Image: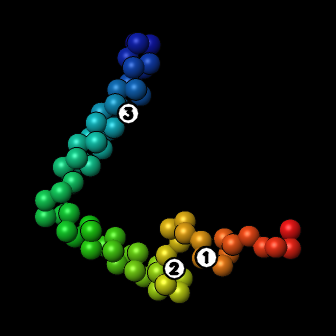
Amino acid sequence: MDVVAALTPPLVMAIGFTALVVTIVRNQGGANKTKEDAAVEAALNSGADRAGGHCGRGTVPRDAAAPTSDG
């Protein structure tokens, strides 16, 4: 009985993980791809609007990156 109790949690996690991977793979591409791409674009555009046109992708304005002569 200890063997069953010891193997149940990993087995449940393995089944859940497999189901998650299958669900992700099934939802890639197809009719959902256009809908997902539109949602991402809308989110990026709304974020850029709130940030004043800068969507925060790791770019630094040219003035902020310039070294100063003050040392």
Q: Is residue 25 left or right of residue 40?
A: left
Q: Is residue 7 above or below residue 34?
A: above
**Distance (Cα) linking label 3 and label 1:** 49 Å
Report the amino acid beneath label 3: Met
Q: Position of residue 39 (x, y in %)?
A: 31, 73
Q: Position of residue 6 (x, y in %)?
A: 44, 18
Which residue is identified by label 1?
62
Which residue is identified by label 2?
54
**Distance (Cα) linking label 2 and label 3:** 41 Å
Secondary structure state at the residue bearing disc 2:
loop
Q: Is residue 24 above or below residue 37?
A: above
Secondary structure state at the residue bearing disc 1:
helix
Which residue is identified by label 3?
13
Report the amino acid beneath label 1: Arg
Q: Earlier in the sequence, mark 2 or mark 3?
A: 3
* Picture residue at 69% right of the left edge, 72% below the top: 66
Outermost residue to the front: 69
Instruction: State which mark lies toward you, 3 or 1.
Output: 1
